[in-house]
Amino acid sequence: MESDVIEQVRSWLLARNPDVTAIGWDEDLIDGRLIDSLDFPQLLLLLEELAGHELELTAENVVAFRTLRGIRDRVLADSPGADTVSHE
């Protein structure tokens, strides 16, 4: 299992989008159709597993779930292994 949590998220997204070869840090996952309303609960479960705790969705923090950078910096910032993420 990879120790880099954001790469696990990227791999999860790429597995669901076989015609996509790369996902940029600031690419909008929703507008880019990498996730839709049916995928979002599964993504949330993955992120909670990686974070090691339940994540709270609020109007203020939901925007952080739209990009890999937001997920890394705001959603998974306190998760184990987050400090090993390269800050490109």
Image (cartoon, grey):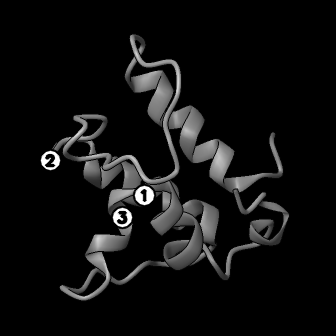
Tell me whether circle 3 and circle 1 mark residues in contact (CB < 8 Å).
no
- 34 and 57: which is toward the camera: 34
Residue type highlighted by circle 2? Ser
Which mark is nearer the camera, 1 or 2? 2
Give SS at disc 3. Answer: helix
Residue type highlighted by circle 1? Leu
Residue 47 versus residue 6 in the image, above or below:
below
- 49 and 4: which is toward the camera: 4
How far across and how far down the image is residue 76, in percent?
59, 72
- 3 and 71: which is toward the camera: 71
Circle 2 sits on which residue? 37
The first of marks 3 and 1 along the sequence is 1
The first of marks 2 and 3 along the sequence is 2
Give SS at disc 2. Answer: loop
How far across and how far down the image is residue 37, in percent?
15, 47
On residue 65, the disc is 3
How packed is label 1: few (under 14 Cα within 10 Å), some, or many (20 or more)? Answer: some
Please give left or right for residue 8 compared with residue 68 in the image. right
Which mark is nearer the camera, 3 or 1? 3
How far across and how far down the image is residue 27, in percent?
38, 46
Spatial CA span between label 2 and label 3: 12 Å
How far across and how far down the image is residue 30, in percent?
23, 47
Residue type highlighted by circle 3? Phe
Please give left or right for residue 69 compared with residue 82 in the image. left
Circle 1 sits on which residue? 45
Residue 25 versus residue 66 in the image, above or below:
above
Quadrant of res 84: bottom right
What's the residue at 31%, 49% (across, down)?
A: 28
How packed is label 2: few (under 14 Cα within 10 Å), some, or many (20 or more)? Answer: few
Spatial CA span between label 3 and label 1: 12 Å
What's the residue at 58%, 66% (across, down)?
A: 72
